[in-house]
């Protein structure tokens, strides 16, 4: 059996690599490279594989920041120093080659931060201060935003730290909205405006027997696209299944060998069901406009059924 050259090789016992001195081989491997037990100048022992030692990737146990390791500088002791609302307690484990310190915030929580971020002022608290905007809060009391009038700020904050405001809507209902939602205009009522708009849109649509005429007319103009054709589904067997929806039901049209044939059958079904319904509706509406009394006693009922394996429609005027 061929010997793995990555685990074999020169004995490194006693050799120095940066701040590490090799003590002995461990008898274990890491990524097929032999692991060596090494002692750092600080006294700590760690296991490092041959490749990382020889390439200089690891030169200490982590007690020296990577950027200063080559220059042999020891990290500055920040214990006891104050950075914003943080007081440095003790050294923490290095992360990504940078010196980290455990800090205690004025609120009592602890947080780890790199020396670089602390000195640069990028980290000043455990995060509690980023949520506290009381020092620069905008007074919205009495201001009008759409149908909402801001009454007073609340203690509640959203995940971004935006203050919630108690608001009174023109309809008389009270609600709480974030400062961002009010100022940016994303919230303009307690919800009544949305309900009114939906009702207004609904009044413009004509629904007969649970089916919207305008939606069917809009779908009628849709064409094929890169993802396929509506109502045509490819099966695991490689064939194409076709169905069509009407009155919240799905009607099976058939399964076909080719995509082109499936699309053709789907379009025929649309002409029979959807187009047939739209034509029947306008025919019924023409008479209903002339005689509203007749329309009230003769609602349009359009039924779809399957005869001899094909879809058929049955118009029932009650």
Image (cartoon, helix red, strand yellow):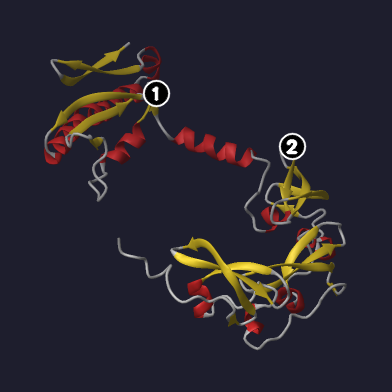
Q: Residue at x 86, y 57 (%)?
A: 108
| SS for callout 1 | loop
Q: Is residue 272 left or right of residue 142?
A: left
Within 10 Å of the Cα at label 2, are there few (<14), some (14-19), or many (20+) other Cα atoms? few
Q: List x then y, in percent, for residue 30.
A: 49, 63
Q: Depth check: give the residue in front, 73 or 311.
A: 73
Q: Residue at x 41, y 69 (%)?
A: 6
Q: List x then y, in percent, for residue 169.
A: 73, 42
| SS for callout 2 | loop
Above-or-below relation of 25 to 144: below
Q: List x then y, in percent, for residue 303.
A: 28, 17
Location of the C terminus by quadrant is top left
Q: Which residue is mark 1?
A: 210
Q: Earlier in the sequence, mark 1 or mark 2?
A: 2
Question: Which mark is on residue 40?
Answer: none
Above-or-below relation of 271 to 107: above
Q: Which residue is mark 2?
A: 173
Q: Depth check: give the residue in front, 30 or 72.
A: 30
**Splitting the image into 4 quarters, where does residue 189 fall?**
top right
Q: Is residue 269 left or right of residue 146?
A: left
Location of the N terminus by quadrant is bottom left
Within 10 Å of the Cα at label 1, are there few (<14), some (14-19), or many (20+) other Cα atoms? few
Q: Is residue 63 left or right of residue 7?
A: right
Q: Residue at x 69, y 78 (%)?
A: 64
Q: Give the tally of numbered discs.
A: 2
Q: List x then y, in percent, for residue 238.
A: 17, 37
Q: As drawn, which residue projects farthest toward the bottom? A: 71
**Splitting the image into 4 quarters, where does residue 210 fall?**
top left
Q: Is residue 289 left or right of residue 263?
A: right
**Splitting the image into 4 quarters, where does residue 114 fall?**
bottom right
Q: Are marks 1 and 2 in contact (CB under 8 Å)?
A: no
């Amino acid at each position: 059996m061929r010997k793995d050259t990555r685990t074999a090789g020169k004995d490194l016992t006693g050799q120095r690599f940066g701040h590490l001195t090799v003590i002995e081989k461990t008898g274990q491997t890491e990524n097929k490279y032999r692991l060596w037990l090494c002692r750092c100048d600080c006294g700590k022992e760690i296991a490092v594989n041959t490749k990382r030692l020889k390439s200089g990737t690891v030169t200490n146990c982590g007690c020296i920041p990577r950027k200063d390791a080559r220059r042999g500088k020891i990290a500055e002791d920040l214990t006891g120093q104050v950075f914003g609302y943080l007081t440095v307690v003790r050294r923490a484990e290095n992360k990504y080659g940078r010196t980290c310190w455990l800090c205690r915030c004025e609120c009592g929580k602890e947080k780890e931060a790199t020396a670089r971020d602390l000195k640069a002022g990028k980290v000043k608290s455990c995060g509690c201060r980023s949520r506290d905007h009381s020092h620069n809060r905008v007074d919205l009391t009495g201001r009008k935003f759409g149908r909402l009038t801001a009454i007073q700020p609340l203690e509640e904050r959203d995940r971004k730290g935006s203050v919630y405001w108690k608001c009174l809507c023109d309809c008389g209902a009270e609600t709480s909205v974030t400062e961002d939602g009010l100022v940016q205009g994303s919230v303009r009522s307690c919800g009544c405006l949305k309900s009114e708009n939906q009702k207004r849109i609904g009044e413009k649509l004509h629904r007969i027997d649970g089916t919207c005429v305008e939606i069917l007319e809009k779908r009628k103009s849709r064409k094929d696209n890169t993802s396929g054709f509506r109502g045509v589904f490819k099966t695991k067997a490689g064939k194409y299944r076709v169905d069509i929806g009407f009155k919240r039901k799905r009607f099976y049209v058939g399964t076909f060998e080719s995509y082109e044939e499936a699309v053709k059958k789907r379009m025929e079904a649309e002409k029979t069901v959807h187009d047939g319904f739209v034509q029947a509706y306008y025919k019924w509406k023409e008479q209903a406009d002339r005689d509203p009394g007749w329309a009230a006693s003769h609602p349009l009922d359009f039924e779809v059924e399957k005869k001899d394996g094909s879809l058929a429609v049955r118009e029932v005027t009650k």
